[in-house]
Image (cartoon, rainbow, N blue to C red):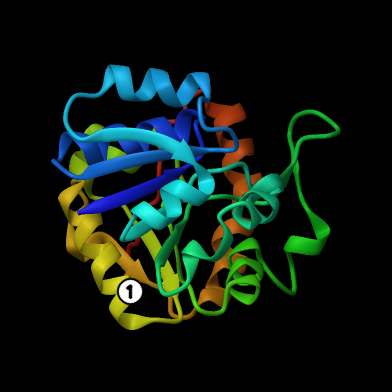
Amino acid sequence: MKIAVLGTGIVGETIGSKLAALGHDVMIGSRTKNNEKALEFVNKNSGQTSSGTFAEATVFGEIVFNCTKGEHSLDALQLAGTGLKGKILVDLANPLDFSQGMPPTLIPSLSNSTSLGEEIQKAYPEAKVVKTLNTMWNGLMVNPTLIGNGDHINYISGNDAEAKSKVMALLVEMGWKKENILDLGDISAARGTEGYLPLWLRIYGATGSNAFNFKLVK
């Protein structure tokens, strides 16, 4: 499958490397065509990997992963142009404001009565936004068996059932057990998963470890 990964930070590199290792054709997108980190990604990963602008990557990908920083995601996606039309857009970003240092706070205009996931869906109504993998350390995103034999929860939400099903299949490829992928319903559920991040950061600070997640016990 042709997959676009938008963002050259640690999350984009981690997701892109995993998908490339699984045999997918991955183009990593950035604001500029010859972005140094994007070129490094291509050099480090064997197989069908390439780099381009956000617009080029979005046209290339059958599925697009938003791995940009949440505070910049809406601006970054504008650079993708019309390429998002009809595409599955997997949103991993969180609307965190680091302007006052650590710990960050949620951006008011993207939280409480709305969410980044919802605002992306509003901005690109013809895209199929699926929110997932945004409640954990990037290492667990692609290797859930690092802790608890992989028996912990990953949430997914979005308005399009078929899009969620396709993303779930990718998540299973990445090592997630299907029974541990919890569908929370439409994209408004992103208010809860994004809103969890301040607590996640406090737990990280209190324990000194980012290798943790939650398990649903009934």
Q: Quadrant of residue 166?
A: bottom left
Question: Badge 1: how crowded within 10 Å, few (<14), some, or many (20+)?
Answer: many
Q: Amino acid at mark 1?
A: Ala
Q: Please state if 1 lies on the left or on the right of 117 as rendered.
A: left
Q: How many marks?
A: 1
* Quarter in which the N terminus is drawn: bottom left
Instruction: Give the image quarter of residue 41.
Output: top left
- Which of the 4 quarters of the picture holds residue 140? top left
Q: Secondary structure at mark 1?
A: helix
Q: Is residue 168 left or right of residue 136?
A: left
Kindly tell me whether residue 18 is visible in this rendering: yes
Q: Position of residue 138 (x, y in %)?
A: 41, 36
Q: Which residue is mark 1?
A: 163
- What's the residue at 33%, 72% (across, down)? 164
Residue 113 image point, x, y percent? 74, 74
Quadrant for the C terminus in the image:
bottom left
Picture coordinates of residue 133 (x, y %)? 41, 51
Q: Position of residue 152 (x, y in %)?
A: 30, 51
Q: Is residue 64 left or right of residue 187?
A: left
